[in-house]
Amino acid sequence: MERSDNLLTWVILAVIFGGAAALYGWLFWSKTRALWQAMIRLRDRIDRSKRW
């Protein structure tokens, strides 16, 4: 019984840490993508202002 409790503990810890890692990875990806989109909009705005 102790062996299965140990395994269950490790499985639960792996799920918790895996979920946290997935969340942080998704947040990093989405914020990086938003930053790139903002930089592209800024570049386009600068390009349009140079034409006048």
Image: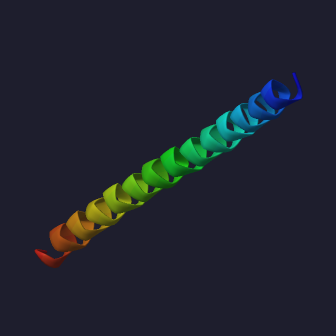
Q: Nearer the viewer, residue 42 or 4?
A: 4
Q: Residue at x 41, y 60 (%)?
A: 35
Q: Residue at x 37, y 59 (%)?
A: 38
Q: Nearer the viewer, residue 18 or 26?
A: 18
Q: Is residue 14 left or right of residue 42?
A: right
Q: Please tell me whether residue 14 is drawn above or below residue 45 in the rendered image.
A: above
Residue 7: percent from left, percent from top: 75, 32
Total count of labels: 0
Q: Nearer the viewer, residue 48 or 8?
A: 8
Residue 11: percent from left, percent from top: 70, 33
User: What residue occupies the far left of the structure in this picture?
Assistant: 51
Residue 3's image quarter? top right
User: What residue occupies the far bottom of the structure in this picture?
Assistant: 50
Residue 15: percent from left, percent from top: 66, 34
Quadrant (top left, top right, bottom left, bottom right) of the C terminus? bottom left
Residue 49's image quarter? bottom left
Residue 2: percent from left, percent from top: 89, 28
Q: Is residue 17 left or right of residue 40?
A: right
Q: Residue at x 59, y 49 (%)?
A: 24
Q: Is residue 17 left or right of residue 1?
A: left
